Image: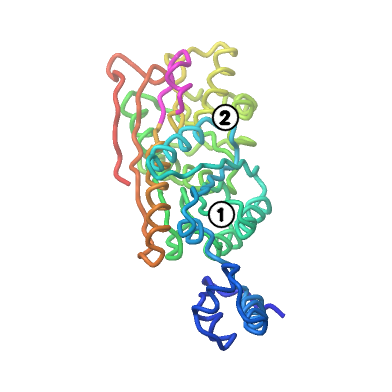
């Protein structure tokens, strides 16, 4: 009967101790090399009892075949993930690796299934950017049979390599910019609050509003999409009291939906309404008026994640590492006034 899964990966040495054979014997059996029948039985029984899973990455390197590396994101249709994937490809350049892309949807169960699938040889390493953080997912990633790097904030977990940014700080930079450009009533349109970006960006907005001693106006959209942004506009426009003259959206897609709905309603941008997004996707610069946005360095985060993954595969025992990418505010037409020309402002991570 298989024992309860441990909080770390079972080693070949532990299998050898359980089976009462040498590490070399375990290695031969697990690599398909013939051994005495009783030795094979003992090794396989010990591996099953301990829940041992072979390190697919090490095996691939040993056999000299190209590494199959996977990147998993929640919604492949979101352009920010395309930027991230290009960054991963840049970080893997020259490694001879193949990149597999998986769009997992929004259900935590789908992510857990993907992680568990690593033991079946789907990939030799995984880069994942989860929208929702759950204890079950973090534990599964930490116990995965292949090296894992997380793009995103999973807390100060010392079991996983991470690439993080501070999107709350990015929203705060946007708020400061709007105040400095003369905007007096600023609203925030969030995505779902049970997501990591939803929590972080909302906290950044509330903190900035309180720091400036301004009214806290928050509207929650149903999703991080253009359609959700459009649907949220009536609530933004109908807030009590005087009109909102600026809005910060949780991401660029929501911002573009808000801008389109506002323009359709006769609100001029930026004269009557300033709009800011987050992510700085390609559409931000080509939309008219072009969209002021907080860049969270999606390409750079992807590149760093690829570097961390290759490092982990080459040096499995190396200390866990977290790398940070600072947010940058890219000012464009959607918030411009004569006194605020287009520019870029960098924040500390």
302, above or below 154, in the image:
above
The answer to whether residue 226 is magenta is no
Residue 165, percent across and down? 39, 46
- N-terminal of the pair, mark 2 or mark 1, is 1
Residue 3, percent across and down? 65, 79
Residue 275, percent across and down? 46, 24
Q: Residue at x 64, y 56 (%)?
A: 117
Q: Residue at x 58, y 45 (%)?
A: 193
The magenta span reads: 281-293
Element marked by disc 2 = loop
Q: Is residue 229 left or right of residue 323?
A: right
Instruction: Kindly identify which residue carries mark 1.
Output: 133
Q: CA gap, disc 2 to disc 1?
A: 34 Å
Q: Is residue 34 left or right of residue 341?
A: right
Instruction: Kindly identify which residue carries mark 2.
Output: 240
> Which part of the image, by quadrant, shows the N terminus?
bottom right
Q: Residue at x 49, y 78 (%)?
A: 24
Residue 173 image label: none
Q: Is residue 285 left or right of residue 344?
A: right
- Count of labels shown? 2
Q: Residue at x 45, y 22 (%)?
A: 284
């Amino acid at each position: 009967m298989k024992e309860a899964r441990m909080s770390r990966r079972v080693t070949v040495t532990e299998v050898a101790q359980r089976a009462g054979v040498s590490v070399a014997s375990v290695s031969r059996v697990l690599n398909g090399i013939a051994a005495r029948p009783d030795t094979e039985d003992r090794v396989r029984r010990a591996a099953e009892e301990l829940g041992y899973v072979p390190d697919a990455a090490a095996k691939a390197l040993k056999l000299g075949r190209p590494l199959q590396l996977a990147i998993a994101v929640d919604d492949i249709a979101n352009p920010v993930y395309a930027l991230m994937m290009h960054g991963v490809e840049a970080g893997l350049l020259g490694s001879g690796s193949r990149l597999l892309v998986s769009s997992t949807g929004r259900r935590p169960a789908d992510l857990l299934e993907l992680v568990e699938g690593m033991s079946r040889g789907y990939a030799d390493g995984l880069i994942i950017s989860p929208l929702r953080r759950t204890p079950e997912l973090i534990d599964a990633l930490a116990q995965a049979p292949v090296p894992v790097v997380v793009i995103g904030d999973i807390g100060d977990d010392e079991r996983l390599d991470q690439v993080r940014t501070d999107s709350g700080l990015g929203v705060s930079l946007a708020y400061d910019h709007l105040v400095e450009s003369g905007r007096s009533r600023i609203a925030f349109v969030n995505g779902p609050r049970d997501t990591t970006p939803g929590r972080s960006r909302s906290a950044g907005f509330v903190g900035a509003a309180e720091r400036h001693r301004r009214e806290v106006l928050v509207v929650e959209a149903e999703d991080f999409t253009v359609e959700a942004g459009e649907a949220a506009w009536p609530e933004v426009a109908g807030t009590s009291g005087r009109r909102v003259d600026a809005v910060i959206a949780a991401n660029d897609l929501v911002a573009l939906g808000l801008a389109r709905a506002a323009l359709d309603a006769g609100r001029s941008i930026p004269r009557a309404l300033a709009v800011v997004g987050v992510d700085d996707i390609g559409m931000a610069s080509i939309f008219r008026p072009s969209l002021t946005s907080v860049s969270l360095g999606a390409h750079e985060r992807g590149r760093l994640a690829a570097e961390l993954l290759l490092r982990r595969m080459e040096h499995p025992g190396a200390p866990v590492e977290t790398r940070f990418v600072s947010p940058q505010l890219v000012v464009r037409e959607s918030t411009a006034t004569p006194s605020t020309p287009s520019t870029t402002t960098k924040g500390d991570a």
